[in-house]
Amino acid sequence: MSARAFFLAAGGFALGVFVSSLYALSWLIIFSTLSVAAAFFVIWFFSRRGAYALLSIVLVACALGGARVLFAPTQLPSSFAQKLGTKTTLSGTISSAPDVRDTNQRIIVSVSEGGETTRVLAVVSSAEQVSYGERVRVRGKLLTPKPFATKYGRTFHYGRYLAAKGVFALMPRATLTKISPPSGFFAYAYGSLILLKHSFLHALGIALPEPAAALAGGLVVGGTQGLGAGLTDDFVRSGLIHIVVLSGYNVMIVADAVLFALLFLPRKWAAGIAAAVIGAFVLVAGAGAASIRAGLMALFALAARASGRTYDVTRALVVAALLMLLWNPLLLVFNIGFDLSVVATFGLILGVPLVEPKLAFIKYTFLRETMAATFTAQIAVLPLLLYANGLFSFVALPANLLVLPLVPLAMAAAALAGLGGFIFPAIAHIVGLPAYALLSYFIKIVHGAASLPLAALAVPQFSFALVVLAYALLAFFAYRLIKNKEPTVAYAAVGSHEF
């Protein structure tokens, strides 16, 4: 398949998923679309005009995307729907890592009844010691997740967010009874990884004071727990929240570090070990959409390096996104983290080679590349971010420039501090001094940027059509820049983004 046909097919599949997620297309529309695609194929067969073949490919891909959504669960099964609003008891298996908060913990329980299966989010006491794969019984009032207003004038569709995780009901203030321990290799393996994560976070608490320990945990394994509402809001206002929710950037840092550490091994051995470590790291971090996307791209790069093949970063991004949508099509519309991750990565791939030459006046290569990457990523996510959270940060660009170059060093120092808390708890605070210095610097930048007058501006709600228009304009300007760019320079820039 040619590159043009491949990207058009990918775009068509995503379009089908998008439309079907919003409007629940019927099988009649799906088959009608396939019929039109067949007609265009017949026209191409006799005319041999490539445009008809491309139209046929796009329409088939659209139909397949729409059909994939029809096979995905989008609502609570009837046997559970009749229990809504009542106090009930459900038995099932814990199907994700417990999300431990200050006063409670949230667990996703996979339950079956009447031949139907679904997942329920139960909020239980944080004193309960539960593990992934454990059989439990939860009792409480079964409710439908309700949307709620956010601080900056947006509506958070909590039900859609949970639906992307296969959860269609919640049980707040539930009581929990254990039935049986985890069973099976994956349950034990994943449970061990989660236990390792909690042990690492505990070790960070020994080596570092708060909120540095919470920030270190966010940098290495993701999450904002322990930061406090005030500091978390400062991270949002300064445009730096992405460094503590384990974005793809953090995963790529780990991937690079693992590969560097394994340089002494043969290529295939290094690739195999690195793949296992990256996979384990993504699972430990909670397997969020951004980390899975970055993990898949890292695995593609490892496979290319081990086999000696060329690694096309753009195609790797598209394939990773397609695989994720095939597995869970609801990610596209119901998970903003997936969208922002894909858009930001595409912005980096396309934008850095275009912007960096414009910064030739900056003589330090590292600073020039960092500024180009930060600028393009911020521009790429801006329309979608404004639509989703309604906050425009005037300080995001300078704050990111001051922090992002030091994130790899801070992650390494935090890992060292955690290791010190494990092995040498008596002197862990000394081992953690480099991490404490870097994390304190991050916190000061965040506090300082967020407290500046007019650091951020709440933007009134607007139509999604403006988001589409904004990306159309960005695509137009990028096309003009690419068209006017010298081929030799463009080739070198693309090569610089290989993993």
Image (cartoon, grey):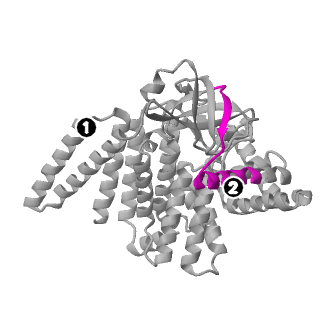
- Which residue is the site of mark 1? 27
Q: Which disc is residue 9 wearing?
A: none
Q: Is residue 378 visible?
A: no
Q: Element type at marker 1?
A: helix
Q: Is residue 176 magenta?
A: yes
Residue 308 percent coordinates (x, y): 46, 79
Residue 94 percent coordinates (x, y): 60, 41
Circle 2 residues within 10 Å: few <14, some 14–19, many ≥20: many
Q: Nearer the viewer, residue 87 or 137?
A: 137
Please give the name of the residue rendered at 53% of the width and 54% of the height, measured from the top-left corner. Answer: 292
Position of residue 195 relative to residue 79, above or below, is below
Q: Is residue 177 magenta?
A: yes
- Which residue is the site of mark 2? 220
- Taking 364 as reference, is 436 left or right? right
Q: Mark 1 is on which residue type?
A: Trp
Chain part drawn in magenta: 172-200
Please give the name of the residue rendered at 79% of the width and 45% of the height, measured from the top-left corner. Answer: 211
Q: Mark 2 is on which residue type?
A: Val
